[in-house]
Amino acid sequence: MEFLSNPDTWAAFATLTFLEVVLGIDNIIFISIVTGKLPEEKRKKATRMGLFLAMFMRIAMLFGITLLIAMKKPWFSINWSWFSADFNGQALILLVGGIFLIWKSTKEIHEKVTHIEHNTQPTLGGQAVKSFASILVQILMIDLIFSLDSILTAVGMTNGLDGALYIMIAAVIISVGVMMLFAIPIGNFVNKNPSIQILALSFLILIGFMLTTESMHLSNAVLFEQEIGAVPKGYLYFAILFSLGVEFLNMKMRKSNTK
């Protein structure tokens, strides 16, 4: 435990915990939308159980970090006249995750715009359990997608530090605790404001696009003789914050007009 007396350890721990919490906001938004399909009395249970299981999944991924690092090696290559890429494990996971986010968010927007209602009322016992279980599976799936990028970032930040694994595990536990604390209030706010739901789903489409371009970047993909680069996260976060600011102003204006 000598590494605890190292200032670099605490600096890395504080920075990593902050990043985990910030990156977890995307996760909370998705969870709030998914659990909104459940009866209100089951939303809190599904959110906390999903995050609790997700925490153990992240810790298991940390123990398998050697495998994740090895996934940088190309698995297969594509070399067409107009497109070429060397796909590795990381790139494939990000690609599948990005496509899943785009598909899922687009489907949710379509259902909300066309007023398709989800049957969330329990009819048969087996049907209710299946719905609850499917929500947990979706929470774990989306956490897996968001975890890979953050865990690889954590490895880079703690590389060379003694007790790096302990630092990463502690940061994951604290960040999930913070997510559990704020997931319910954020979820209630999102579900009570349809415009915020559509905006949040639009953000997830942007994030899915970012994961897809990141996948192409890791694969050294070339499209029509142009290398595909990753979208800087700063641009994405600025767009999200700007859009949220505009929407909050619109909500305040609508509230004033109602009064």
Image (cartoon, rainbow, N blue to C red):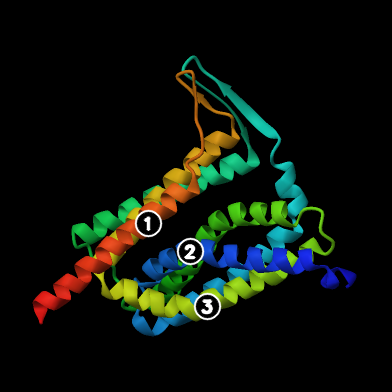
- Label 3 crowd (10 A; few <14 / some 14-19 / many >=20): some
Is residue 86 or residue 171 the one in the foreground?
171
Query: Is 14 on the left or on the right of 99, as rendered?
Result: right
Give the distance between the C-alpha atoms of the residues marked 2 and 3, in whole angstroms. 11 Å
**Label 3: element kind:** helix
Give the distance between the C-alpha atoms of the residues marked 3 and 1, in whole angstroms. 22 Å
Judged from this view, the residue extending furthest toward the front is 7
Amino acid at pointer 3? Met
Residue at numbered disc 2: 27
Residue 99 visible in the displayed image:
no
Q: Earlier in the sequence, mark 3 or mark 1?
A: 3
Amino acid at pointer 2? Asn
Is residue 28 or residue 158 the one in the foreground?
158
Residue drawn at x 33%, y 57% as measured from the top left: 242
**Label 2: element kind:** helix
Q: Position of residue 156 (x, y in %)?
A: 71, 51
Answer whether labels 2 and 3 touch (C-beta < 8 Å): no
Q: How many marks?
A: 3
Residue drawn at x 30%, y 63% as measured from the top left: 245
Query: Is 85 on the left or on the right of 205, as rendered?
Result: right
Quadrant assignment for the C terminus: bottom left
Q: Earlier in the sequence, mark 2 or mark 3?
A: 2
Residue at numbered disc 1: 240
**Label 1: element kind:** helix
- Label 1 crowd (10 A; few <14 / some 14-19 / many >=20): some
Q: Position of residue 192 (x, y in %)?
A: 27, 75
Give the number of the disc on residue 180.
Answer: 3
Q: Position of residue 193 (x, y in %)?
A: 26, 71
Judged from this view, the residue extending furthest toward the right is 2
Give the distance between the C-alpha atoms of the residues marked 2 and 1, in whole angstroms. 14 Å
